[in-house]
Each structure stands twice: as structure tokens, then as C-alpha cells.
């Protein structure tokens, strides 16, 4: 059986299909998933344009009900759908369950946002004239998502898109189609106009590129790599389409000489290796004050070696497999590159042969690295962290900021003055104090600076900047 695309209110076969393989067990083929072609996309674009007009006219309570129902079902089925997510992506079952539950929270949060759409009114500078400022939907939005948080990234785009009255064409990553079909199936059962929500699966270079290049799209929200973000930006700009890009990073966690080292190691392990290090918020650079450097490294090596790598669905697994062979080879490439650049492999980085054939890599710590090395400049996106020694707090902060990226950063310290200085001077969109660089809330803005993000923020009430456009109306009261 082939899982289908959802277009114009119907599940539709694709001209081709791809196999979805479990990275924990390469003999487990989860299913075959349809690939949309240009004619499917055209159908989706036409249907979305019509349905969006109807959706924008619906009462707010209907929108609220739809979003609330989707959110509550996701939370109720977090165990089941989280297990399926972990099976295809390779994060642990607990991480999969947490992601689905969080996705539900995005929907219930934006259900409430539906009812907070209140505009402004003002007196004109001219006598007898009133001014009204209100937000209207953008229209039809293209949502393009990565494989590493296949449901959460989608939920934090789809929920505000629908809440603010838009039609949606969603193109998920080809590595995680099952999660996309599950979420779509839930949305498809709601009381929405046919064609309002469309799932088009396929590769980025074909269907993704055609979607971004369509003049029928009013806005594109993308999460993925910097390289894809560049392509999408230049494609969308030819139509002057509004864009929002969330991309990679090279987040620095600074461990101060006044740090609690247990907290430091706990945060570093969590930030660097959980989710198999495949997070845009991962602590890939561990920047450590020289006074605590050797002890931190010793404790970190011990904690890293103790991590249990295994099948994503086994209860005692802490680190699942790498998502696929391409990513595995990229990790190996950077491990070799780092050592040729002069860094030292303190532990890990091995291909593990476990009971199932899977892409298992032991978490790796590279030490004696410096910030100019490519391993500290380019996103690796695997269970690999690099330690850099800092001469002082000021030097540590400078190293944290010395990167083309700027999504998250962190400081571990007991000093209030250094924590305060750091939070004010870190050039990142999110700053963590005595917390891992990964792990954010859903009711506040999320995004980065420099090459990590482009456009307005996602999440919380800030999402309305992207999903709406402002209209200013002047009314002469007396004629
Ligand atoms: P990717 O860029 O390869 O793909 C992301 C999505 O874009 C996929 O759906 C893909 O098919 C599509 N795509 C690729 N090229 C396209 C094109 N030319 N036109 C249209 N669509 C295209 O990224 P990935 O490997 O799936 O995900 C990993 C990357 O995502 C990492 O760089 C990670 O840091 C980033 N990420 C960022 C955030 C964030 O919020 N900043 C969150 C999660 C992941």
C-alpha cells in the first residue's frame, strides 16, 4: 500500500513513491509514500486559493474548534504517534512522545490565539476621520519542514497559519513522511473547506522548488539547512514572495570558572547529544574556561562514554541512530577533518554494530580544538561536540559570538553579573543561563540572528507578523 498525498480534500496517488526505512533497523521498511508531481501541485494551489477565501470568512469559533480538536488529539495520541515518529526518525521513544505532545500544545495555544485577534483604532490627524488597523490573512502559505523535528516544526507553522485564516500547502522532508501523513490525517477529519490544507510530499529540488517558485503562493515559511535557505530565498524573491527562514547553527555553550560542573556536564550532554545531536539548537561548541577545562573534559568523557546508544524504540536507549547513511558519512567526514585540523578525539565516533542493522554512532567528543577549525565553523548535525579552551570570561563570550550563525547560546555560571552580561551581549536569538542550549517553550518567540534566521519570528504571538498582513482603513464619519 502507498500512503498518499492529501490534495483538494482527497487522498491522491502519486506518479512515483519512495520507501521509508527505519534508521534503527534497516530491514524494517515502514511503508511506501507517494511523491507529488507538478500536476498535483497545481491542483493543490488552485484548491487552496478557493478554500482560503471561505476559511477567512468563517467565524472565529469554528477555527478555534478545529485547532483545539487537532491539538487535543495529538496530546491524547502522543504515545502512539511518538513511537511512529521515533521509528522513522531515530530519536528515542521518549523524545518522539514529547515531540508529538508539544505539537499538540502548539495547536491548543494557537486555538486561543484565534480569539485574540484584536485590531487598533485611532483618530486621524484630520478632523472627522477615524482610522482602523486590522490584520488579514496572507492568503496561501507554503510550509517546508525538515526531518529532525518532523511534527513540531510543522505544528508551529500549520497552527498559526490556520489560526490567522490562511490556506496551507505543506511539503515535509522525504525522510519522515509517516509523521506527515499522521498529522494530515487528523487535520483532514476536521470541519475545514476542501483544499484548505494540502500535503504534497516530494523532494526539495523538484516539488519544493516548484512550490516556492509559484506565483500563487503568498508566503513561504521554511525550516532547514542554510544551503536550502539560500536557494529558497533567491527563488522566492523573483516573485517578491514574503519569506521566513529558520536554518542551521553552531551554538556555543560557555562553561565559566564559576560554574557548577555537574550542571555544566549535564547541560552539555543534553545539548550536544540528545536527539542524536541532530538539532538546530545543539551545543556543538563547548567553550570552557581554562581553570575548569581539564576537569570538565574528564567528567564529560566519562558521561559521554556512559550514554546508551541503541534502537530508538528500546526503553533504555538514550541516543538513537543517525537518521541515514548520508548523515552518517557527513559525521565521519567531519570527525576525520577535525583530527586532520589538529583536534583530538577523546572518545566516540565509532560505527556500532548492534542487534539490528542501523546507523549507530557512538557520541564523539573532540578536544583541543580551536574556533577557526572548520569543525567549529560548519554545522555537522550529528552526535559530535568540540571543546575549545577559553582564556577568560570575555574570551569565552567572544568565541561564542565568533560564528556566522546565531540561533542559541548558553552560559553555565554561578555569577549573576557574568550571567547578566552574557545574556545582554550574546549575539543569538535565544540565550540559556544554566540550561542546555536546546529546549524551548511554545508561547514565546523562537528564532535566531545572522545566518540562522531570516524574516520575522516563529512561535508565540509573534507568529502573526508572518501569517498576517496589516490593513489601515480611513473612515470619514460624516459625509
Ligand atoms: P534541508 O534543507 O535539506 O531540507 C529541509 C526541507 O526543505 C525539506 O523538506 C526539503 O525537501 C526542502 N528543500 C530542500 N531544498 C529545497 C529547495 N531548493 N526548494 C524547496 N524546498 C527545499 O534540511 P534537513 O536536512 O531536512 O534538516 C536539517 C537542517 O534543518 C539543519 O541545518 C538544521 O539546523 C535545520 N533546522 C533548523 C531549525 C530552526 O528552527 N532554526 C529547526 C530544525 C532544523
Image (spheres, rainbow, N blue to C red):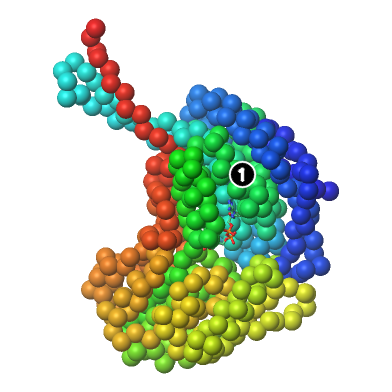
Q: Specify the farthest residue to the right.
A: 1
- In the image, taking residue 365 as reference, residue 403 lies left or right, namely left
Position in image of residue 452 (x %, y %): 44, 60
Position in image of residue 116 (x %, y %): 39, 35
Q: Specify the farthest residue to the top.
A: 479
Quadrant hosting residue 69: top right
Position in image of residue 271 (x %, y %): 49, 72
Classify 10 Å Cα crowding around label 1: few (below 14), some (14-19), many (20 and above): some
Position in image of residue 378 (x %, y %): 49, 72
Residue that carries the numbered disc 1 in the rendered image: 210
Q: Nearer the viewer, residue 304 or 45?
A: 45
Quadrant hosting residue 256: bottom left
> Is residue 44 in view from this perspective?
yes
Q: Residue at x 57, y 73 (%)?
A: 382
Q: Nearer the viewer, residue 345 or 357?
A: 345
Q: Residue at x 57, y 52 (%)?
A: 145
Q: Residue at x 61, y 83 (%)?
A: 349
Amino acid at each position: 500500500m502507498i500512503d498518499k498525498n492529501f490534495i483538494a480534500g482527497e487522498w491522491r496517488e502519486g506518479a512515483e513513491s519512495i520507501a521509508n526505512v527505519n534508521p534503527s533497523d534497516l530491514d524494517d521498511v515502514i511503508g511506501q509514500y507517494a511523491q507529488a508531481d507538478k500536476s498535483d501541485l497545481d491542483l493543490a494551489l488552485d484548491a487552496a486559493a478557493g478554500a482560503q477565501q471561505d476559511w477567512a470568512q468563517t467565524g472565529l469559533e469554528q477555527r478555534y474548534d478545529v485547532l483545539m480538536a487537532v491539538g487535543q488529539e495529538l496530546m491524547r495520541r502522543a504515545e502512539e504517534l511518538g513511537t511512529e515518529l521515533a521509528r522513522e526518525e531515530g530519536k528515542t521513544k521518549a523524545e518522539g512522545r514529547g515531540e508529538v505532545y508539544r505539537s499538540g500544545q502548539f495547536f491548543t495555544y494557537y486555538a486561543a490565539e484565534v480569539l485574540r485577534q484584536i485590531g487598533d483604532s485611532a483618530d486621524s490627524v484630520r478632523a472627522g476621520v477615524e482610522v482602523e488597523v486590522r490584520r488579514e490573512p496572507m492568503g496561501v502559505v507554503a510550509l517546508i519542514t525538515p526531518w529532525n523535528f518532523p511534527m513540531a516544526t510543522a505544528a508551529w507553522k500549520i497552527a498559526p497559519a490556520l489560526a490567522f485564516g490562511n490556506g496551507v500547502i505543506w511539503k515535509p522532508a522525504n525522510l519522515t513522511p509517516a509523521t506527515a501523513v499522521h498529522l494530515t490525517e487528523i487535520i483532514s477529519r476536521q470541519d475545514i473547506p476542501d483544499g484548505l490544507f494540502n500535503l504534497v510530499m516530494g523532494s526539495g529540488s523538484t516539488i519544493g522548488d516548484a512550490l516556492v517558485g509559484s506565483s500563487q503562493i503568498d508566503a513561504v515559511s521554511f525550516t532547514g539547512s542554510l544551503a536550502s535557505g539560500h536557494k529558497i530565498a533567491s527563488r522566492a524573491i523573483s516573485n517578491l514572495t514574503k519569506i521566513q527562514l529558520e536554518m542551521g547553527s553552531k551554538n556555543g555553550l560557555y562553561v565559566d570558572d564559576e560554574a557548577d560542573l555537574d550542571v555544566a556536564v549535564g547541560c552539555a550532554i543534553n545539548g550536544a547529544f540528545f536527539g542524536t545531536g541532530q538539532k538546530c539548537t545543539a551545543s556543538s561548541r563547548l567553550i570552557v574556561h581554562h581553570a575548569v577545562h581539564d576537569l570538565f573534559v574528564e567528567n564529560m568523557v566519562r558521561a559521554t562514554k556512559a550514554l546508551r546508544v541503541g534502537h530508538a524504540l528500546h526503553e533504555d536507549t538514550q541516543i538513537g541512530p543517525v537518521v541515514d547513511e548520508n548523515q552518517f558519512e557527513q559525521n565521519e567526514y567531519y570527525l576525520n577533518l577535525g583530527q586532520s585540523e589538529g583536534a583530538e578525539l577523546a572518545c566516540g565516533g565509532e560505527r556500532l554494530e548492534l542487534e539490528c542493522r542501523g546507523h549507530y554512532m557512538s557520541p564523539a567528543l573532540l578536544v583541543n580544538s580551536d574556533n577557526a577549525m572548520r569543525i567549529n565553523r560548519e554545522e555537522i548535525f550529528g552526535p559530535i561536540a568540540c571543546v575549545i579552551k577559553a582564556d577568560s570570561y570575555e574570551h569565552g563570550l567572544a568565541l561564542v559570538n565568533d560564528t556566522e550563525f546565531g540561533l542559541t547560546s548558553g552560559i553555565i555560571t554561578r555569577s549573576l553579573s557574568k550571567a547578566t552580561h552574557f545574556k545582554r551581549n550574546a549575539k543569538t536569538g535565544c540565550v540559556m543561563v544554566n540550561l542546555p542550549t536546546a529546549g524551548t517553550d511554545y508561547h514565546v518567540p523562537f528564532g535566531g540572528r545572522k545566518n540562522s534566521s531570516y524574516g520575522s519570528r516563529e512561535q508565540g504571538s509573534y507568529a502573526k507578523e508572518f501569517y498576517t498582513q496589516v490593513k489601515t482603513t480611513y473612515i470619514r464619519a460624516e459625509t
